Image (spheres, grey):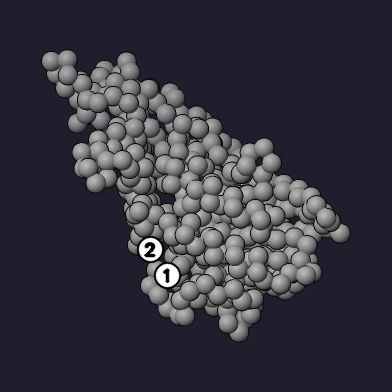
Amino acid sequence: MQVRFVHFADVHLGFRQYGLAERAEDFTRAFGSVIRYCRQVQPDFVILAGDLFDSKSIDPRTYADAGLALLAHDGIPVVAVEGNHERWFRRGERSWLWQLSRSRRLRLLQQIDPEREGLEWRPWTAERGHGAYTDIGPVRIFGVEYLGARLADHLPRVIEAAQAAPADVVQFRVGVLHTGVDEESPGGQGGVGAADVLKLRGVADYLALGHIHYRYEVPVADPWIFNPGALEAHSITEGLMGEPGLAGAGRERGLYDVTVELGDRPRVDARFIDDVVERRPFVRLAIDVAGAESFAALREKVAAALDPPSAAAGPRPMVELVLRGELGFERAALDQAALLELVQERYEPLHARVTLDVERTLGAGVRVRSGSRDQIERDVVRELLAQEPAVAAQAESLAERTLELKRSVLEGQDEEALASIVEAALP
């Protein structure tokens, strides 16, 4: 007997990167392409591992864009957990996923009732709007909502409850978490360490993760923990491919189409798929400024380096122009607006920006700190934190979180998302 399901996460409906309405439409389009894929392949169920919405407070159109009614029409159950973007930190608050669960558009799994507190291992019902687990045929699916750094302390109770629950007809178990594995996450802090999450092997045959926006699998040799990444890029860096030196760039993002051969020892075939997701193109143009002794010379160099516009029809790209190297003239003479005009003429982008990653002579042979802009910022923040005895031991990871917070503010993420970054950095 076979069971088939589709696993994806981090949809982020409603996110207006740089305040652009077109970017919110991009996230809706990406989600719609996955809905169409699910309707085409007709899986037994769908796993949504958190962050369907980008914000706790959403407008009516964003709620309507959650096209789960189409899957409900086809009789395909959707099982979900709350992510950090849609989960309220205040006790007693209900998310929009709870409302969707009450309307039978999905089955919301959570371990802690926000009104009653404490772990409750009860099956999902639409009347309650949530439950710790749900059974679909011979498959039991349990889920844990986003808990940040508290997850590791909570997992032993989840394992104990899962082991104690009757499961006479269950042949396969799926766990769903919205968390990152530290060892696979930017800055080494995803939410829980590999040693803690690997303990779930006794109660989960497949562990479906969300939260980190690129694909990874654990353990590498024989994976049973899968993170598909986001559907659409949440930042310019995430949208890039082929630049592995940048955090999150050059990493795959998509979904898993999973087939399970049931039996005494179930066999799992988790196929990663990314070519069915419709996305906006992202372009990073890196220009070496060395040798340009005036802005006019630099402008000519940039113009010569820009690729000709593509004749292929498609969404207008997001473009970042990066200037690197030793600047041969005064920084004040660098006219970023003129360079953006070149980019605009060549690419007609939806959005473009210039990033400076340059050295410049200060006089008397003194130079500014060398290295990429990201590395310089990280080094400066780390050195400042290292001077404080209370946090010196965590200076490296806290520096990464600080820069993540800065990037999130610049990308336009809401207050609750920013609060989750701060919460993840706290001991």
Give the amino acid type for the residue marked by disc 2 in the picture: Glu
Residue occupying image coordinates x 63% and y 39%: 220
180 in relation to 150, above or below: above
Q: Do the residues labelled 1 and 2 touch (CB within 8 Å)?
A: yes
Q: Could you say where residue 236 lies in the image, as x and y percent from the top left?
A: 45, 44
Mark sitting on residue 276:
none
Find the residue positioned furthest to the right: 1
Q: Report which residue position mark 1 lands on.
A: 88
375 in relation to 408, above or below: above
Q: Could you say where residue 160 lies in the image, as x and y percent from the top left?
A: 59, 65
Q: Quadrant of residue 72?
A: bottom right
Work out whether mark 1 precedes mark 2 in sequence or the reverse, and give the earlier one: 1
58 in relation to 282, above or below: below
Mark yes or no: residue 263 visible. Answer: yes
305 in relation to 161, above or below: above
Query: Which is nearer the eye, 38 or 5?
Result: 5
Residue occupying image coordinates x 42% and y 70%: 88
Residue occupying image coordinates x 43% and y 23%: 304
Q: Report which residue position mark 2 lands on.
A: 416
Q: In which quarter of the image is residue 215?
A: top right
Relative horizontal placement of residue 326, taking residue 14 as reference (left or right): left
Mark 1 Cα shell of 10 Å, populated few (<14), some (14-19), many (≥20):
some
Relative horizontal placement of residue 422, taking residue 305 as reference (left or right): left
Give the amino acid type for the residue marked by disc 1 in the picture: Trp
Q: Could you say where residue 309 lies in the image, as x and y percent from the top left?
A: 52, 35
Residue occupying image coordinates x 44% and y 25%: 305
CA gap, disc 1 and disc 2? 8 Å
